[in-house]
Image: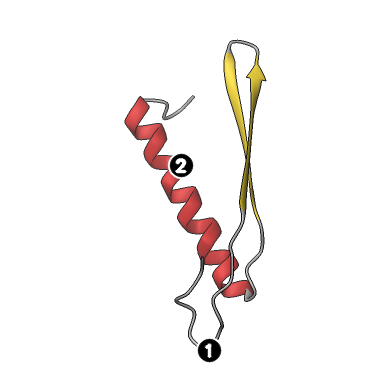
């Protein structure tokens, strides 16, 4: 639930994840649905992308 946007009623924010095999690797596809305001959509994408880079560092995947 998004309940922190000034002037907006709380609303759901959807993220869909799909997982599958890609040879000897796993593939994840993330779909972030747009927010009611383009600013918050941009912020959501930036935040999600930042979290993914933390996985790269955590598991030593940087540069692969």
Residue beneath the point at 56% across and 84% down: 8
User: Is 4 located above or below residue 34 in the figure?
Assistant: below
| Residue indicated by mark 2 | 52
Q: Is residue 33 left or right of residue 8?
A: right
Mark 2 surroundings within 10 Å by alpha-carbon count, few (fewer than 14), some (14 through 19), many (20 or more): few
In percent of width and height, residue 31 lies at 65, 48
Residue beneath the point at 51% across and 65% down: 1
Q: How many marks?
A: 2
Q: Is residue 39 left or right of residue 57?
A: right
Secondary structure, mark 1, is: loop
Residue reaching furthest bottom?
Answer: 7
In the figure, residue 12 lies in which quadrant?
bottom right
- The one of 27 and 19 positioned closer to us in this rendering: 19
In percent of width and height, residue 17 lies at 61, 40
Q: Which mark is residue 23?
A: none
| Residue indicated by mark 1 | 7
Secondary structure, mark 2, is: helix
- The one of 46 and 2 positioned closer to us in this rendering: 2
Q: CA distance from mark 1 to mark 2?
A: 30 Å
- Marks 2 and 1: in contact by CB < 8 Å? no
In percent of width and height, residue 43 lies at 51, 65
In percent of width and height, residue 27 lies at 61, 26
């Amino acid at each position: 639930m998004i309940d922190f946007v000034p002037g907006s009623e709380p609303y759901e924010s959807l993220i869909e994840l799909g997982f599958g095999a890609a040879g000897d690797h796993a593939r994840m596809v993330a779909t972030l649905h747009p927010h009611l305001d383009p600013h918050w959509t941009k912020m959501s994408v930036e935040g999600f992308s930042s979290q993914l880079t933390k996985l790269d560092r955590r598991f030593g995947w940087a540069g692969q």
